[in-house]
Amino acid sequence: MKKIKVQLDFNITKKTHSLYHSFFNNPPEGVEYIKSEFVGVNEKSYSTLGKIYKKIVKILPFVSKFHQTINDILRKDSGADLIHFTFHLGNTKKRCVADYETGYSFINIKDKENNLVKKRIIRKLNKKNLKYLMPIHKESLKSFKLLFGDKVKKPQEIIYPTIFISEEFRQHVKRKNRIIFISTNNILEDQIFLIKGGLETLIAFEKLAKKYPRWNFTILGKLPSNIKMDFPKNLLLINSLPREEMWKIFNESKIFVQPCYQAPAMAFLEAMWFKLPIITYNCWANDEYVDDKNGILINPESINSYIDKYNVPDYTKDVLERIKENSSKNSKKIEKAVEKLIKNNNLREKLGENGFNRVSTGKFSIDKKNEKLRKIYEYALIK
């Protein structure tokens, strides 16, 4: 089997997104991944250069339009056979492929109605050296089609994100009566908390904690500062933890609640690795991960059209206010779903096992993803 050297390009960044750790740790057979390097940029210089760039953009805002150009100029030639661009498309003469979350991975959201810019992006997407496009969800592909129509003539295949959690973190333990919800460590404002369904989950957890004193209802992360912290003793708030410590909590828990308005792929995949049934909303791409075989999909109260014309969630002030207004009604739906699983141990275990099968050997497994990636890379090198 021919060895293929693939350069994974994240643009200039300090850390690799966790969804790509499996690329380096568990690559397809015969594939070697290397991360793009950039002239003058390393761990020591990254923070300083980042601060300088932000100051320049603050003084000269137009410079931000050349963000991708700057990355392209500074990108080093690694000698790879091809470049795999992640959530963006750089300029290169090498053969390349690109994955994306929405159509906005390729065009600035401010330019979505600018026909001149859109035509330029379409020309870029149709360049001969770009061989394949890889949406990460069905909803991603839908967004791309709505934004660019049928004007981009490139093969596309959905490549779902994957992670791998080794057995040392999944050892058999006696599970506690614990239900978990992941908040966020970035509470500069309450938007992220609301988008994750945090407000309605908190309301549901408070009621359930009183009704089921032998169960623990655990929130991993922070809460907005305007929320009073007068909770029942079995409603626990655990601030940010290293990932491995968080996995320990997953491994000891019984139910995962994440009623978000768009798919948090990493969180869903982690829950499935630990055989946790998932409770979430039937919203943007969530149903690609969760169904009645591995969890419970809740239809939330309407928040009108929070999906824009190009199939991308758009959290305007009105949408966020609507989420707040609906929190009481939605909390009752979450409460009902949680109670169903609390009362039915056999159902919990069945759903959890089905989810585990999906990440270990099925739809979201490393092997399934690697099989597709290897074929795509081979195609890109011969076409």
Image (cartoon, grey):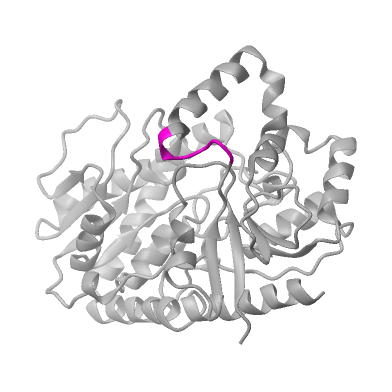
In the rendered image, the vertical position of residue 63 relative to residue 43, given as above or below: above
In the rendered image, the vertical position of residue 290 relative to residue 375, given as above or below: above
* Horizontal relation, residue 139 to residue 261: left or right: right
69 drawn magenta: no
Q: Position of residue 325 (x, y in %)?
A: 46, 36
Q: Which of 101 and 62 lies nearest the eye of the viewer?
A: 62
Which residue appears at 45% of the width and 32% of the height? 45
Which residue appears at 9% of the width and 60% of the height? 214
Give the overall secondary structure of the magenta segment.
Answer: loop
Q: Quadrant of the C terminus?
A: bottom right
In the rendered image, the vertical position of residue 340 relative to residue 36, given as above or below: below
Total labels: the figure holds: 0
Which residue appears at 36% of the width and 64% of the height? 270
Residue 157: name its quadrant. Answer: bottom right
Q: Position of residue 300 (x, y in %)?
A: 49, 52
Which segment is the magenta one? Answer: 39-44
Residue 202: name its quadrant. Answer: top left
42 drawn magenta: yes
Q: Which of 284 and 366 lies nearest the eye of the viewer?
A: 366
**Residue furthest toward the bottom?**
1
Q: Position of residue 131 (x, y in %)?
A: 78, 66
